[in-house]
Image (spheres, rainbow, N blue to C red):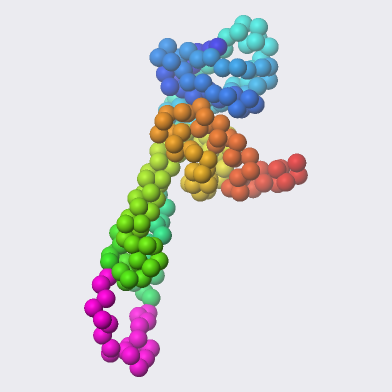
């Protein structure tokens, strides 16, 4: 058991994670928490107002059955993080689209260049690209399926941003050893493990355990971590 203080104030909703046992706890309104730990276990302290802090359990902590953790938020505040939405499947690079040469039947001087199509309707996707309605139906079994796919992608993107903001980049980089530029890709790879469902149901401890477990075999580990895992 223990208590967490940020700037000498007992703080609620601080996440305490036992790295060795992959267990976690959350402090209450009095900063109090309980978590299983043994000597030399490392506790990761994480909060929206902090980057992260690690505390090692000592013999004194075990003997006293209590640990008091003080954190100074002024020296651990995160830098501003700007999250960029991943490009959608129909997104067109504006630079490429603007400067690319026009290629069509007329520019290629094909025999059917001046033949008008048989009133084939087109549909405009959210990204602004117009495509054949017939081709769209054949490829995706209708616009309804496309809308569902685009809606699913949008929802997943928003939840990935929320999960990343909740844990902070420091957790992914320093604790999970994930490259900062690859955090979104790492989270996308964890979607099949149910992380969005766990997050929306506020099952933070289970979500944390899933992220820790998947980071061990992630292809987005920092370069030195790749080498270390390979040697082991």
Identity of the residue furthest to the left in this view: 119
Quadrant for the N terminus in the image: top right
On the image, the x and y values in percent for residue 54 come to 58, 25
Identity of the residue furthest to the top in this view: 64
Identity of the residue furthest to the bottom in this view: 111
Identity of the residue furthest to the right in this view: 231
On the image, the x and y values in percent for residue 14 come to 46, 22
For the point 42% across and 12% down, the residue is 30
Q: Nearer the viewer, residue 220 or 223?
A: 220
For the point 27% across and 70% down, the residue is 122
Q: Is residue 108 magenta?
A: yes
For the point 27% across and 66% down, the residue is 123
The span picked out in magenta is 101-122
Relative vertical location of residue 225 with respect to residue 142 in this rendering, above or below:
above
Q: Nearer the viewer, residue 144 or 195?
A: 144
On the image, the x and y values in percent for residue 144 come to 32, 57
Relative vertical location of residue 49 with respect to residue 135 in this rendering, above or below:
above
């Amino acid at each position: 058991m223990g208590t967490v203080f940020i700037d000498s104030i007992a703080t609620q909703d601080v996440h305490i994670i036992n790295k060795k046992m992959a267990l976690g706890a959350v402090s209450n309104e009095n900063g109090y928490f309980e978590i299983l730990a043994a000597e030399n276990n490392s506790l990761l302290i994480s909060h929206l107002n902090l980057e992260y802090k690690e505390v090692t359990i000592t013999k004194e902590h075990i003997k006293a059955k209590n640990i008091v953790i003080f954190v100074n938020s002024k020296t651990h505040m995160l830098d501003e993080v700007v999250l960029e939405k991943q490009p959608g499947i129909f997104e067109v690079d504006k630079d490429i689209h603007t400067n690319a040469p026009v290629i069509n039947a007329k520019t290629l001087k094909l025999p059917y260049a001046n033949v008008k199509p048989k009133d084939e309707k087109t549909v405009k996707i959210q990204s602004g690209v117009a495509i054949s309605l017939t081709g769209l139906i054949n490829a995706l079994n209708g616009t309804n399926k496309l809308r569902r796919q685009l809606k699913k992608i949008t929802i997943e993107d928003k939840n990935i941003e929320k999960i990343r903001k909740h844990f902070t980049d420091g957790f992914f980089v320093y604790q999970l050893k994930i490259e900062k530029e690859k955090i979104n890709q790492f989270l996308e790879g964890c979607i099949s493990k149910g992380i969005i469902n766990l997050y929306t149901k506020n099952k933070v401890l289970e979500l944390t355990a899933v992220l820790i477990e998947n980071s061990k075999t992630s292809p987005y580990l920092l370069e030195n971590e790749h080498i270390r895992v390979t040697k082991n």
